[in-house]
Image: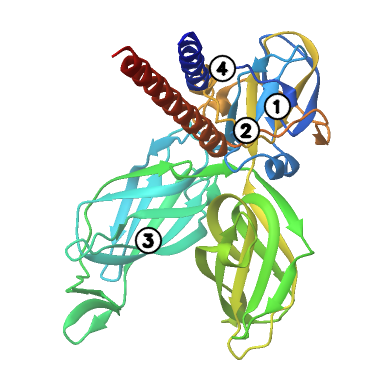
Amino acid sequence: MKKISFLFLFLLFDIALLSATPVIPLNPDDFQYCVVIDGPIKNNTLYQLRLTDDILKKSNAACGDIRLFSQDKKEIPYGIIENEHPSEVIETYPLEIIKYTDDKASGIIDLKLPEKYQPISLIDLDIADRDFKKDIILYGSHDGMIWDSLVKEPIYDFSSQIDLRKTEITFKKADYRFYRIKLTDTQTAVDAGKAIKLKYESLDFSVTNIQNKKLRINKVVGRTGSKGDKIITYDEASFANFSINTDKNHNTVIILEAALPFDRIYFDISNPYYYRNLGLYYSDTGKDDSFRLLNRSSIYTFPLSGLMETKNYIAYTAVKHRYYKFVIENKNNPLLEIRNIRFQWVQKNLYFVALNDAEKYSLCFGNNVVNRPAYDLQSFISQDNWFRQKYEILSTTQVRQNVNYVPKLPTDKKAKFEKLILTAVVIVMVVGIGYWLYRLARKTNKQD
C-alpha cells in the first residue's frame, strides 16, 4: 500500500514538473550564428547597426531570432527600423496674385512668393468649380520681367461622375520668386458639346458637358515638396547562378535560392525587345509541390514614339523566403536571355543603447525556437522618429558559425513531445490506481 501511495505521489510530481516552463536567460550559445560588433562602445550611447544580407539570410523571416549580447553575455534591448524617412519638412507659402489678364482663348495669372522662402516644386490651386478641364503652362521668373517655361500639364475635375480631381502643378524644384500661370481651354469639342468617355471591362465612365468656362481661383499656395515624398535607402544582392529550365508549355522556369526579402526584383535581359507575363512563387523547402503564388506581373522593353519603354522588374514587398520560382510565359516567342537577377529591399538597421563601456558586443541569430522579443526601447526609437535622433554607426565582422550551438526542438515538436510524456504518465497512473483498487478489493474479500 505504501509503495502504491509513493508511486502516486511521484507521478503527481512528474506532472507538475512537465507543467512548469522555467524562463532561462538566453546566451550566445543558444544561436547558430554570431557576428562581432567592434567598439569601443560607450555607455548610454545610441548606436546604429546595418543588417547585411548575410545576416538576413541566416536569421528568420521577421528577424525575430536576433539577439544582442554584451561581453558578459547580458541581453541588450534593440529595435529594427527600415531606412526611410520624409524627404524634408514641407514648407507652404501663400502666392500673392499681382496681375490677371484674360481673353477669349486664355487667362494669365502672375504670382509672387513672400520675401523669405525656400525653392518650391508644387503649386496648388484652390478652385471651387466642378466639371472642368484646362491646360496649364507654368513659367518662372527672378525679376517678373524675363520668364522661363517650366512645365505644361492639365488640371481637371470630373466629380459629378467620379471622384477624380487634379488641381496641383508639379515641377522640378526651382528658386524663382515670380510665377506665371497660363490657362487655356482643352480642345475636346464634339457635336453634342464637351465630353470625355472611357469604357474598360466593368468601368463605364462618361462626363458630358465639360464647359469651357472661366474658373474661380480662391487662392494659390506653393509647397517645397509633396507630402508623400520620402528618402529611401536600399540594399541589394545579385545572383548569376540559378536553375533555369523550360516546361512543356514553353515557359521559362527559374528557381533561385535567395533567402532574402525584397521590394523589387530586377532582371538583366539581353533581348532587344520583349513583353512577357511573369508569375512569382515562393517556398521555404524548395520541393516541387511546395511553391505558392506570390505575385503576377509583366516585364517588357519595346520602342514607343522614338523612345524605349522598359520595365525590367517586379515591384512587390515580401518578407524573406528561402526559395523563389519565376515562370515567364514565352508563348511562341524566343526564350529570354537572363544574365542576372538582382534583389532590392529597404535597408534594415538595428538601433540599441549601450548599457556599459565595452570593446565589443555580439549579435547572434539562427534559432527556430525563440520568439520575437519585446523591448521598451522599441517604444522610444521608431520608424517615425529615428532620423531625428543623434546616433553613432557601428559595423560587424563576418558571420561565423557557433561551434557550441546545440539545436533545440521547435516549439511545436517540443509541445508534442511533452504531450506524449504526459499521456504516458497518465496511463501509468491509471494502471497503478487500477492495480491498487484491485489489491484493495481482494484484501476486502479475504476479510469478509
Query: Spatial distance from mark 3 to mark 2, Cα to Cα?
Result: 59 Å
On the image, which quarter does residue 68 sit in? top right
Query: Spatial distance from mark 3 to mark 4, Cα to Cα?
Result: 72 Å
Work out whether residue 92 or residue 7 is closer to the camera in this orientation and state it: 7
387 above or below 222?
above
Q: Amino acid at mark 4?
A: Val
The residue that label 2 is drawn on is: 65
First of labels 3, 2 by sequence position: 2
First of labels 3, 4 by sequence position: 4
The answer to whether residue 321 shows anywhere in this view is yes
* Viewer-nearest of discs 4 and 2: 4
189 above or below 411?
below
The residue that label 3 is drawn on is: 182
The residue that label 4 is drawn on is: 23
Disc 2 crowd rating (10 Å Cα; few below 14, some 14-19, many 20+) is: many
Q: Whole-percent x and y of residue 386?
A: 56, 27
